[in-house]
Image: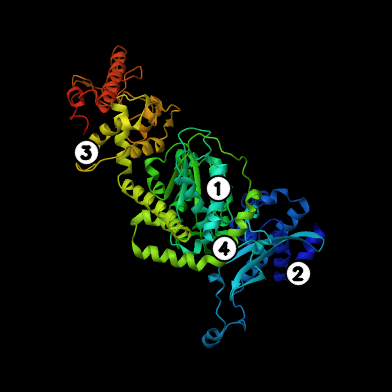
């Protein structure tokens, strides 16, 4: 170790950086990235510095002791050299400083505007395994390859293969058809035929990130576990541009990895963000802004005695999985999502892994170089057309740009779906709240058909001023809302209807989430009306609870349950036309409820 330290002290800064870069490349990093992280914690212990590096570059955890010592010694020596350089009071003026005219005469650097793919070569160099990055792009219609000096933290599992340019450059329609079959085979999307269309277009759109101003997030949700959420996200991510999946990440890792490779990022089980949003404020702020281009996340990095502002570009497609719906506090994040609601089902293929989709990815990496300008022109034409407005356009224009190159049928299918969600988006929270109110107030539990409650729901929307008198809602609207609220579909098909299992626990939980209840899973804190128009009021003590943590006496509970059963039967009879509901409906309690 002493010999190594002495040797390092005799080397120039450029030689030290070159030596550090060789080591960094072995672990998917660069000398500059190591130095940035080291400067953030240079006055900490060696163990803390190493833990910080491992937190951002997990491959370092497999490094042997010799590499660890060399990396830390090189970083310490480079930091010391830069500190000494910063203390010089009168540095000599370098001859490399140019005049304005000399600067103007230099060749323009247009490298950032080039649409390229980055290929990883793993080779043996000087007896050691080394990772090289090669930049592949089009120049005058021909494929050009060159060594990329800047290191990128690229997810190797979903990167293009070294021969991706040999893959057939299929038409967008051929790629879409093949990709949609893959998504349908591995993920059980149920009867919602639009979902594999949306996920396939999402994967294809990820390869043209630079063409769009905004990108949607895919929110994959179900009301219960084991519905294939994670599998659906894997299919979406593993067929996308440098796709990668994580379940637990740090803010520093997210910023650097996405900035470096602009990968499609999948976050599995994000309930922890809902439970403790204050602990993940940085990640949430980044998610809120990075769906739109040109809004970087900025951080300070210590360089010598000074701090420099470093910008991280987190813009790109992302996907989440979770069971619990977004809390009201994160409704803005929810508005940036295209929601995919999963139901239990059986796919025809199992265990999706990145290597199984290398062939279709290579075709899309190749198409990225050939089709980029067409996609960009189509996107800009759609934006000018104003066929969609506001946030709906932000979410669906990237997908529609790809759909328009596939076929008119696919384009119309996605456009119609986007317009349907556009109508729902403006009032989605109030409409959902009204549906939960209906289920809760009238005790609609058990196996329920959306068709049987459609008319009652429609009346309540009108009474609440959420639906104009001349407008109607369709059974499909109720079906979609029940699914998105997390209710499970019943297996029976009686009377040629779709049926859902409405359980009291889920209704109470949703009632709490939408502000109908004061306490989660406690159905007694809302004022109800009985069939005689009399109120059942909670006790006034504390937050409506008595000393036994109850809000109504035990003798009233059987009456309330019996009343719920009566209301449920009345609704079913009224909706099937057997009973005149207006004569049987209980009087509304206008003093405690706006309905």
**What's the distance in space between the residues labelled 1 and 2, CA to CA?**
57 Å
The answer to whether residue 63 shows anywhere in this view is yes
Front in this rendered view, residue 514 or 104 = 514
Q: Earlier in the sequence, mark 1 or mark 2?
A: 2
For label 4, the residue is 367
Query: Is residue 249 in sight in this rendering?
Result: no
Residue 122 percent across, percent down from the top left: 73, 59
Query: For the residue carrying disc 3, how many other residues have a C-alpha within 10 Å: few (<14), some (14-19), or many (20+)?
Result: some
* Residue at mark 4 to residue at mark 3: CA–CA distance: 50 Å
Rate crowding at label 4 as few (under 14), some (14 to 19) or many (20 or more) other CA atoms within 10 Å.
many
Secondary structure beneath label 1: helix
User: Compared with residue 584, is residue 377 higher up or lower down, i.e. above or below?
Assistant: below
Look at the image and tell me in which quarter the C terminus lies: top left
Instruction: Write down the residue under mark 1.
Output: 181
State the separation of the CA atoms marked 2 and 3: 79 Å
Q: Which residue is mark 2?
A: 11
- How many angstroms separate mark 1 from mark 4 (CA)? 19 Å
- Residue for badge 3: 462
């Amino acid at each position: 170790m002493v010999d190594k330290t002495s040797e390092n002290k005799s080397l120039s800064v450029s030689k030290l950086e070159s030596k550090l870069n060789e080591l960094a490349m072995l672990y998917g990093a660069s000398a500059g990235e190591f130095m940035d992280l080291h400067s953030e914690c240079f006055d900490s212990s060696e163990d803390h510095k190493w833990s910080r590096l491992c937190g951002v570059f997990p491959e370092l955890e497999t490094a042997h002791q010799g590499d660890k010592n060399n990396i830390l010694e090189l970083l310490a020596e480079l930091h010391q050299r830069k500190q000494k350089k910063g203390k010089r009071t009168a540095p000599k003026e370098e001859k490399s400083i140019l005049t304005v005219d000399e600067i103007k005469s230099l060749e323009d650097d247009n490298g950032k505007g080039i649409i390229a793919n980055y290929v990883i070569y793993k080779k043996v160099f000087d007896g050691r395994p080394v990772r090289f990055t090669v930049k592949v792009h089009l120049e005058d219609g021909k494929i050009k390859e060159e060594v990329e000096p800047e290191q990128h933290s690229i997810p190797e599992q979903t990167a293009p293969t070294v021969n991706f340019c040999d893959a057939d450059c299929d038409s967008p329609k051929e790629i879409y058809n093949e990709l949609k079959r893959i998504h349908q085979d591995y993920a059980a999307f149920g009867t919602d035929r639009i979902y594999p269309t949306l996920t396939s277009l999402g994967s294809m759109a990820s390869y043209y990130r630079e063409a769009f101003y905004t990108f949607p997030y895919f929110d994959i949700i179900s009301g219960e576990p084991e519905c294939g959420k994670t599998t659906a996200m894997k299919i979406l991510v593993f067929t996308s541009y440098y796709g990668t999946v994580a379940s637990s990440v740090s803010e520093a890792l997210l910023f650097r990895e996405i900035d470096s490779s602009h990968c499609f990022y999948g976050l599995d089980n994000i309930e922890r963000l809902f439970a403790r949003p204050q602990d993940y404020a940085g990640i949430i702020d980044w998610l809120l802004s990075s769906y739109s281009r040109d809004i970087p996340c900025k951080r300070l990095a210590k360089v010598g005695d000074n701090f420099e502002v470093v910008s991280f570009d987190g813009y790109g497609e992302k996907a989440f999985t979770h069971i619990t719906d977004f809390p009201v506090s994160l409704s803005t994040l929810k508005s940036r999502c295209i929601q995919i609601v999963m139901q239990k089902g059986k796919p025809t293929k199992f265990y999706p892994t990145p290597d199984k989709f290398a062939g279709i990815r290579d075709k899309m990496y190749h198409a990225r170089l050939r089709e980029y300008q067409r996609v960009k022109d189509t996107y800009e034409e759609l934006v000018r057309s104003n066929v969609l407005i506001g946030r709906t356009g932000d979410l669906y224009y990237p997908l529609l740009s790809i759909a328009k190159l596939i076929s008119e049928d696919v384009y119309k299918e996605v456009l119609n779906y986007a317009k349907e969600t556009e109508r729902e988006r403006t009032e989605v929270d109030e409409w959902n709240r009204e549906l939960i109110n209906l289920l809760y107030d009238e005790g609609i539990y058990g196996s329920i058909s959306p068709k049987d409650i459609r008319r009652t729901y429609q009346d309540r929307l009108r009474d609440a001023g959420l639906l104009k008198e001349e407008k109607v809602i369709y059974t499909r609207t109720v079906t979609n809302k029940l699914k998105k609220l997390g209710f499970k579909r019943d297996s029976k098909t009686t009377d040629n209807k779709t049926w859902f299992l409405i359980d009291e626990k889920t209704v109470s939980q949703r009632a709490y989430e939408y502000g109908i209840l004061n306490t989660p899973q406690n159905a007694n804190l809302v004022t109800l009306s009985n069939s005689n128009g009399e109120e059942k009021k909670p006790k006034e003590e504390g937050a409506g609870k008595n000393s036994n943590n109850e809000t109504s006496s035990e003798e009233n509970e059987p009456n309330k349950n019996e009343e719920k059963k009566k209301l449920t039967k009345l609704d079913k009879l009224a909706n099937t036309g057997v009973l005149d509901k207006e004569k049987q409906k209980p009087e509304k309690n206008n003093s405690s409820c706006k309905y």
